[in-house]
Image (cartoon, rainbow, N blue to C red):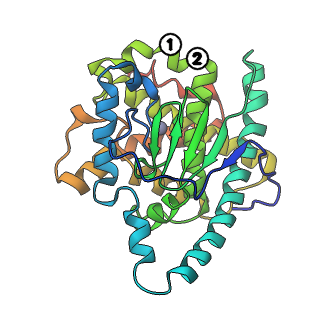
Amino acid sequence: MDLNNLRETSNFDDRRGEGGFGGFGGPSWGGGFGGLPAFGMRGGGLGFVGFIILVLLFGSNGGGGLLDSVLGGGGQQQIAQADNHTDDAQLDFARKIVGSAEDVWTPILQARGVTFSPATITFYTQDTPTACGEGQSSAGPFYCPNDKRIYLDLSFFNQLADQFGAPGQFAQAYVIAHEYGHHIQNLVGTMDQHESQLQGSSARGATGASVRLELQADCYAGVWTYHADQRFHILQNGDVEGGLRAAAAVGDDTLEKQTQGTVVPDSFTHGTSAQRMRWFQRGLQRGEMGDCDTFGAATL
Ligand SMILES: [Zn+2]
């Protein structure tokens, strides 16, 4: 990626190192990467479903497990410092992606008569309070519609590269752009509009509202890519392929195959690898929000 033309957002909050030791329960919203919104707070079934999905996603590696394995043994101090240094570069990177998302989405929403207001990206380690309940990094990056914040523990990017096989800056950019896509859905009213479908027990499943919401966020990540490249010339050789690799890595079928050996479409919340790649590419093709109507699509 070429980041030279991107400005760093000022809408961020650095809570790294503030994490407590509480939060033994799973998050009560379904907010893992590709995160579902916070309807679980209202006592519907989706929060529970979301928790299950988080377990599927990150089952063996919850909480500080990753950090523990990285920092195990002697010389912890040195390694920790090196990590922090790396994280600062990653934080600046994430601020640039969010800055470009603000620049890209402001005029697009304006043209639709929707006033843009920015999301705040919140960097944290391990756990942090959110308006959607206790946020834990084992959930992966997520968006909370109640406080309009994207929550990101930067160590997820190591996991994305090492565990999910999706290295590279653009894979990371895709993750942030997907979460920003949820913010756009929140601003334009998509979440409210489909609230009842997203709350019900039918939310999950291969053609359920959850999958439609998530695939639309993937499509919006493609829309962002198109315009960010038009305006700021971000794409370099191999970038799109890196994004597609990330989209494929977090498909429901791929994750279920890896974690449980079988694929159960009735349990889907985010869509298959093929679908996630397809909708990302669809948004990327022309940069048109209107091409992302996953709720109206007969075929996902
Ligand atoms: Zn999502």
Q: Residue at x 39, y 54 (%)?
A: 249
In the current view of this chain or complex, which residue is farthest to the front? 21
Tell me the residue that label 2 is attached to. Answer: 189
> Between 225 and 177, which is closer to the camera in this rendering?
177
How many numbered marks are there? Answer: 2
User: Marks 2/1: CA distance?
Assistant: 6 Å
Residue 79 screen position, x and y as percent: 54, 80
In the image, is 126 to the left or to the right of 86? left
Considering only vertical position in the picture, is 16 above or below 278? below
Task: State the residue at coordinates (50%, 81%).
Answer: 76
Image x and y of residue 31, in percent? 44, 38
Q: Is residue 127 left or right of residue 111?
A: left
Label at residue 193: 1
Is the residue under label 1 in contact with that under label 2 (CB below 8 Å)?
A: yes
Q: Is residue 151 left or right of residue 33?
A: right
Quarter of image, res 211: top left
Viewer can see residue 276: yes
The three-letter code of the residue at mark 2 reads: Gly
